[in-house]
Amino acid sequence: MIKFTVTSTKGGVGKTTLTANLGALLADMGLRVLLIDADVQPSLSKYFPLAVAKPAAGLTEVIVRGAVSASCITATLYQNLDIVISDDPEGNLPHWLLNRIDRGFRLRFALQSPAVVEAYDCVLIDTQGAIGPLQDAAVLAADILVSPITPEILSAREFRDGTMELLERLEPGGALGASLGPMKAVIYRQDRSADARIIASGIREDFIKLKGRVAVLETVVLRVSDEAQLPGAATEGDHAAAAKASVRPTSIEQRRRLVAESLQVGNLGNNARDLPVQADPTHDCQIELSVEDIHPYEHNPRRANNTKFNEIKASIRASGLRNPFTVTRRPGESHFVVEAGGNTRLLAIRQLWAETREPRFHKLGVLFRPWRSESHVLTAHLIENEQRGDMSFWDKASGAVALKAQLEAEKETILSLRQLEEEMKALGLSINTATLAHYLFATERLGILGEAVIDLSGLDVKTLQPRLNAMKRYAQTRTSLAENELYAMAFEPVFRQTADEYRRTSSFSIAAVCRACEEDLADVLGEPVAELRMALEPVARSPQVSLGGSPAEPTVSTANTGTAVPRRHTQAEGAIPAKTEGAAVHSRVIEQVRLCAGFVGISDCLRSDEAAPLGYCMDALPIPLHGDSLHPSRQWAWQLLTLVSATAAPPECFAAGDPCAADSTSQVPDLPVDAFQFDAAFFGWLVDANDQTASACWDLLGLVREFRSSASTPGLPGSEIAAEDA
């Protein structure tokens, strides 16, 4: 199916006559033709006799509904020729359309209806000789534009100025997938005068300069009174022969009867008096908005300023907006909001408009999507920011918790973590329950840290949460303090002090936070901190063991939901014993070892070995099946953990290159350095700040160093050597 729109900003040039005759010619050739009268003066609607005197519906229903149904189409008395009549004699429809945000594309989408696509080969649209929203919609709906030009100075000038200005104004719609069709100009009603021939020639020469934007057809439609006098014109004998061969009525009496019937057509009715109240489109569509009409999304989870703002602004200044905004609008609001990312670009364009006042920064082509829900828009922003990969842990956690609250408000029910995971997945956001539990804990208990410490990571929270839970359980065996009171008295002062220190130095250590919390808790309980740390050691080493020594179900606390998520652990994890020397530090080392192994999926290689310096050793990595290669990060993490297991003991435990004491029964083998891959790729991985396993390994090495330093404590093995080294 092909769609033609006959258009010109000047009236009286023959648009309706050209549309009617072209439609009749195509129908006579056997093509199925639909005429659309998009002129408030219904001349085309009265051109052909209709099968019904008063059609039930016409263009008003097409525009208002945004679709073409069978009731909108009226058959003429000629085969293959139907019409959508103009039923708005008072001109209400253009005013209604003017207030629609999808005004330019409404007819374009309507003509994609099955009632048109499946029933017709050609659609011809007649337009009004003026500028307005109805004419814009007709132009944007066409595959090919046809414009008649009479060889007169005023007509040619209006085409050169008015019609071309119309095309230039609508061309930006191409960025939204609504490209303008090619413009075909036809010299119309040319007479025998020399002026007419000169003007026609001037029109052709003038439009050669437009570089293909307009093609002037070789075909010339002659003025009827001059047709027989021009070279090559048909003679009276030709007309007579054609009349005899025609099956159409040609007698004078028949023609008089048709003229009389045509004069009795009358007005076709007015269906545009009571137009419906404006409402946003119910489907995705392209629209044009001013920059003031678009507001940033006020609940954007990404709160930090974009560090590349100046680069983005400079790019838009030089090249314009390459990707249109996607916007939506809440019911009842007058402004639009960015639906799925783009707040930074919107700020840049607003600044550029204020600074330059260039029209290209004021009127923007955007993609409009109907409003679905607040949770849908928030999810779209979370997904967009996650794909960019520059959201902080705290912004992710805050966004996920805000989405949880919004979903619960919309569904009027409390969601469990499993239900929350499923609801988010249905919206296109995948976050597992364990991560959600960490997010909930962090926003509930670590707000002071999260708001101030940009460097707070998920790994930090995973390290801190079990330690705080162990301290909480210990405190509950010593005092009647409620959890909120415990946090207010012992932990939150540490968080505030850490936040203040971070603002001054930009330095942050989660291990230091853990130690400070232990010290403050010991002070609150009136106990020596060493005693508290010794009591916490079994829990820190094996979370499945309670403070009373009996097994307990390991959980991840989620204070604001009242739920708990079981913590998964391997048999090897629970079996690793603690070393009594430097017990508090050793427990943190073991926890970090488990974390590193878990990140790369080698927890099954972690095995208890009481004779080993740290109480564990690493079994060999399994050989990959089916010839698959081993992922480098697994190999690197394994070799690092293997080396740590054999060399992390205090110095006096080593003798003559043996990683263990001479009288040790440890089965840890000799580990020559050349047995491992310490190449550039390994060190590149180890210093990659974006790799969570590498970051965890760095933290492990720091803890190992701290553990070795504990050998200098009086009474611990190796203190003498450490003291001499000092």
Image (cartoon, rainbow, N blue to C red):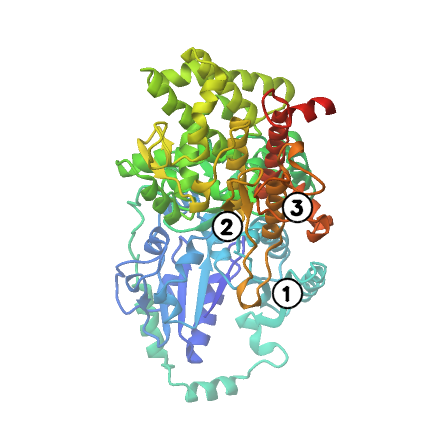
Tell me which label, 2 or 1, sits earlier in the chain.
2
Disc 3/disc 1 C-alpha distance (Å): 61 Å
Q: Position of residue 21 (x, y in %)?
A: 46, 71
Tell me which label, 3 or 2, sits earlier in the chain.
2
Residue with the mark numbered 2: 130
Relative to 120, say whether 509 is above or below. above
Looking at the rendering, which quadrant does residue 126 occupy?
Answer: bottom left
Question: Callout 2: 10 Å neighbours few (<14), some, many (20+)?
Answer: some
Looking at the rendering, which quadrant does residue 257 occupy?
Answer: bottom left
Residue with the mark numbered 3: 685
Disc 3/disc 2 C-alpha distance (Å): 67 Å
Looking at the rendering, which quadrant does residue 49 occupy?
Answer: bottom left
Relative to 302, say whether 197 is above or below. below
Q: Position of residue 399 (x, y in %)?
A: 45, 34
Residue found at the far front of this picture:
663
The residue sitting at 70% across, 49% down in the picture is 672
Residue with the mark numbered 1: 215
The dot on residue 624 is none
The residue sitting at 37% across, 54% down in the picture is 66
Instruction: Describe the element under mark 1 as helix, strand or loop.
Output: strand
Disc 2/disc 1 C-alpha distance (Å): 22 Å
Q: Amino acid at mark 2?
A: Ala
